[in-house]
Amino acid sequence: MCLAVPMQIKKIDGLNAHCVTNGITRDVSLMLLQDEAINVGDYLLIHVGYAIQKISEAEALSTWELLDQMLAEDTLSA
């Protein structure tokens, strides 16, 4: 199973982007999206250090809501 986490771009340096989500920052590769228009402020799905898809802010927020629900349910069942 593959898990990709939504993050927002804060800075772009060539084919690398500095991204943030929930207070966590990561440098990620834009290599797989080099043919797309990517800008500071955009939201991306990140998998093992690579941006794999550009998404809307609404999609990013919805994904985090689902991930938070899954974590909450897992915590309750433990």
Image: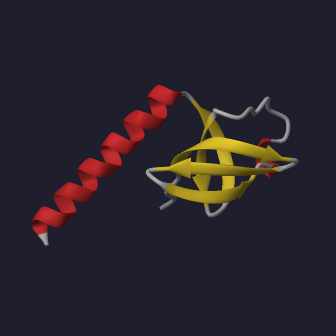
Q: Is residue 30 left or right of residue 42?
A: right
Task: Please count the marks in the image.
Answer: 0
Q: Position of residue 41 (x, y in %)?
A: 64, 33
In the rendered view, tell whether residue 57 sits above or below residue 15. above
Quadrant of the frame with the C terminus:
bottom left
x and y, in percent, of residue 58 in the image: 45, 27
Relative depth, front residue between 14 and 4: 14
Residue 62 position by quadrant: top left
Q: Residue at x 77, y 48 (%)?
A: 30
Q: Residue furthest right?
A: 14
Displayed quadrant of residue 8:
top right
Towards the viewer: 14 or 2: 14
Q: Does 37 sit above or below residue 23?
A: above
Q: Relative to residue 55, is residue 47 depicted above or below?
A: below
Left or right, residue 39 beside residue 42: right
Image x and y of residue 61, in percent:
41, 35
Task: List x then y, in percent, for residue 2.
Answer: 52, 59
The colour scheme used to paint the residues is: secondary structure
User: Image quadrant of residue 75?
Assistant: bottom left
Left/right of residue 34 with respect to residue 29 in the rendered view:
right
Q: Residue furthest bottom?
A: 78
Return the residue nearer the eye: 67 or 19: 19
Query: Residue at the location (51% across, 29% down)?
Result: 57
Which residue is painted at 63% across and 49% down in the image?
Answer: 19
Camera-nearest residue between 72 and 40: 40
